[in-house]
């Protein structure tokens, strides 16, 4: 069983920031407007907690991280300084970049310190969070029409899965 004590403070911060980075990266991968972005972030956040509870009840690592995020303790959270960008498009790009830069570090930590089955579950959980976000809203007016998943969102999912060492996550549809 993998627990908080298996990780340094810096490693724990990375592990607890990755679910939130996956959610924010899914929202930021495509600039769909405030309504769609809100739906995407809500869906990802919901997946973060609901999937941890229902999908990974026996994964001590996922449970500990979800609990730490929910309580905002143990260094869980994202420092605002990580997203210092001017303009909305630059901020979106910075969020996606931060998620994709953090994922390989998380992959290394999981390989070095976590039980293999818990590490695999963590990776699936992260990809489920990102997938929930990109599939939450369509691209058209108020997120009600158009493609459910754009090429940019699909690219984000593929890059995230590669960087995290996770299997690719199939998506429902994407804009061609």
Image (cartoon, rainbow, N blue to C red):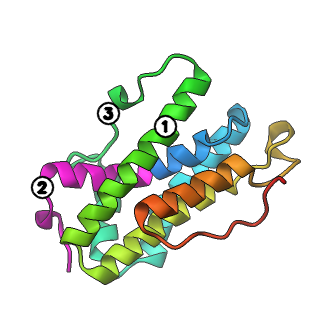
The answer to which of marks 1 and 2 sits earlier in the sequence is 2
- Nearer to the camera, 99 or 2: 99
Task: Report the residue marked by disc 2.
Answer: 8
In the rendered image, the vertical position of residue 62 relative to residue 67, given as above or below: below
Residue placed under numbered mark 1 in the picture:
95
User: Dot 2: few (<14), some (14–19), or many (≥20) neighbours within 10 Å?
Assistant: few
Quadrant assignment, res 123: bottom left
Residue 103 is covered by the magenta coloring: no
Q: Quadrant of the N terminus?
A: bottom left
Task: Give coordinates of residue 135: x percent, y percent.
Answer: 70, 57
- Per the model, the C-alpha gap separating discs 2 and 3 is 18 Å
Q: CA distance from mark 1 to mark 3?
A: 12 Å
Please give the name of the residue rendered at 12% of the width and 55% of the height, measured from the top-left corner. Answer: 8
Element on which disc 3 rests: loop
Q: Nearer the viewer, residue 43 or 164?
A: 164
Disc assigned to residue 79: 3
* Residue span colored magenta: 1-20
Q: Is residue 67 left or right of residue 173?
A: left
Horizontal side of 107 relative to 150 (left or right) equals left
Q: Earlier in the sequence, mark 2 or mark 3?
A: 2
**Helix, strand or loop for disc 2:** loop
Query: What is the crowding at mark 1: few (fewer than 14 residues within 10 Å), some, or many (at least 20)?
Result: many
Q: Position of residue 73 (x, y in %)?
A: 23, 48
């Amino acid at each position: 069983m993998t627990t908080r004590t298996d990780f340094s403070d810096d490693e724990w911060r990375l592990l607890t920031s990755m679910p939130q980075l996956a959610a924010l990266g899914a929202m930021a991968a495509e600039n769909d407007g405030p309504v769609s972005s809100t739906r995407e972030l809500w869906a990802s956040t919901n997946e973060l907690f609901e999937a941890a509870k229902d999908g990974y009840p026996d994964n001590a690592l996922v449970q500990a991280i979800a609990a730490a995020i929910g309580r905002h303790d143990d260094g869980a959270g994202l420092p605002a300084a990580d997203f210092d960008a001017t303009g909305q498009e630059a901020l979106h790009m910075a969020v996606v970049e931060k998620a994709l830069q953090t994922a390989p570090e998380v992959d290394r930590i999981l390989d070095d310190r976590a039980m293999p089955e818990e590490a695999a579950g963590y990776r699936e959980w992260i990809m489920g969070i990102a997938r929930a976000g990109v599939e939450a809203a369509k691209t058209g007016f108020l997120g009600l029409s158009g493609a459910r998943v754009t090429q940019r969102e699909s690219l984000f999912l593929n890059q995230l899965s590669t960087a995290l060492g996770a299997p690719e996550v199939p998506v429902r549809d994407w804009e061609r």
